[in-house]
Image: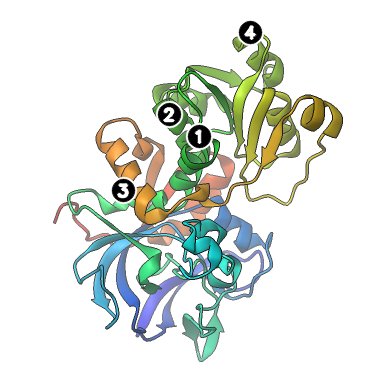
Amino acid sequence: MSIKAAVVAQKGAAFEIKDDVELAPMQADDLQVHMVASGVCHSDEALRKGDATIDYPIILGHEGAGIVEKVGSHVQNFKPGDHVILSFYACGNCPNCLQGKPTQCLHYAANNLSGVRPDGTAHFTENGQKVADMFDQSAFTTTTVVRERNAVKVPKDLDLRKLGPLGCGYVTGSGTVLNTLKPRPGDTIAVFGTGAVGLAAMMAGRIAGCTRVIAVDIVPDRLKLAQELGATDIINSKNQDPVAAIQALTNGQGVDYAVDTTGVTAVMENSIKALAQGGVSACIAVTPHHIDVDTWNDLCVGDKAVIGVNMGDSIPQIDIPRLIEFYRQGQFDFDKTEKFYDFAQINQANADSLSGKTIKPVLIIDPDYQPGV
């Protein structure tokens, strides 16, 4: 079937919305999903500009929310009319998946970043030529086909336009704290960068019971929002040394945990320097930059750890419903970071994300959608 999609024709090209893209036929374990909205993520920009090796042309988008239109013959957990959030695909059969670690799926790259479906066939074509996909979903489309494992069912009374970013940015930040770092009540945490991922990590720190939740950024409006969302302390690192400021807030000890969401070399290194003895820093940005670690003072004598975390070590079918419950309880107000854009405004939405003008742009793909209907 023909669909409308935002296509990136070549490395670094702008998004171009086309209406002649052909969607692959459904397979037995597929869902056909009518897209309502999709978040715009920094990972989309990383692939658009070529920070990772991938084929072009490509249809990006991996924070989609929509309504199931059709289901394949082998689908067990979904039916037409279900509201869903789309996330990454994991095979479910490799040793890591069977241990409950789908973000460490041994076939993760092949399934999500190869540009084709898990069986090697094209997800999309234009004029008979393959158009690469992302995360086995490509949410910047009016309709897509995904595997059952890509989807998470959500309550119909919630506004689908808001929910898509739970599939990546918000589950990545919160999962890094709740699933990986696992602070105990009374621990301390600093979050470097208060974009969508950073604010999600910060809110998770409060949910976990951290008594110091320190937000570090250079944008005053973002720091103000961080306070509104639960930061106990804010540091404008443009005006003061964040490491010294964190030490002052923690009686000279540093924080138990740090999360860097910026991917900036100096900031990542500061997240390590700001740690207390035995502390852990999670560097989770998609970035081409590298860091210099003092193996003697930091890793050995300081007994510190630096880790990477993919997608918050999440199991989307468990973690996303948990975040929705936190949202209902007023503990995870992720929607305060969002701003809606028409689908045709995709390049403006991406530019506003890059400049920091908008924390989490959300593309409204179906303007006729009515929440709760």
Q: Is residue 303 visible?
A: yes
Q: Nearer the viewer, residue 121 or 106?
A: 106
**Residue 77, placed above or below residue 194:** below
The residue at which mark 3 appears reads as 321
Please, what secondary structure does the residue beneath circle 1 have?
A: loop
Query: Would you call the spot at circle 2 few (<14 residues within 10 Å), some (14-19), or many (20 or more)?
Result: some
Q: Are circles 4 and 1 on residues that touch, CB within 8 Å?
A: no
Of marks 2 and 1, which one's residue comes earlier in the chain? 1
Q: Quick one: which residue is furthest to the left in this view? A: 373
Q: Residues within 10 Å of mark 4 (few under 14, many from 20)?
A: few
Instruction: Determine whether label 3 and label 1 are within 8 Å by CB.
Output: no
Query: For numbered disc 2, what is the local secondary structure?
Result: helix
Label number found at residue 208 = 2
Which residue does the numbered mark 1 point to in the structure image? Answer: 182
**Residue at x-position 22% and y-position 64%:** 82
> Could you tell which of marks 3 and 1 lies nearer the N-terminus?
1
The residue that appears at 29% across and 60% down in the rendered structure is 84
Q: Which residue type does callout 1 highlight?
A: Lys
Label 3 sits on a secondary structure element that is: helix
Q: CA distance from mark 2 to mark 3?
A: 17 Å
Q: Earlier in the sequence, mark 4 or mark 1?
A: 1
Disc with the residue nearer the chain's start (2 vs 4): 2
Q: Quadrant of residue 241?
A: top right
The residues bearing labels 4 and 1 have C-alpha atoms spaced at a distance of 22 Å
Front residue of this view, candidates 131 and 153: 153
Q: How is the image coloured?
A: rainbow
Per the model, the C-alpha gap separating discs 2 and 1 is 8 Å
- Residue 322 is situated, as x and y percent measured from the top left of the image, at 33, 43
Where residue 12 sits, quadrant-wise, is bottom right
Residue 339 horizontal/vertical position (percent):
39, 43
Residue ID for mark 4 = 251
* Pointers 2 and 1 in contact (C-beta within 8 Å): yes
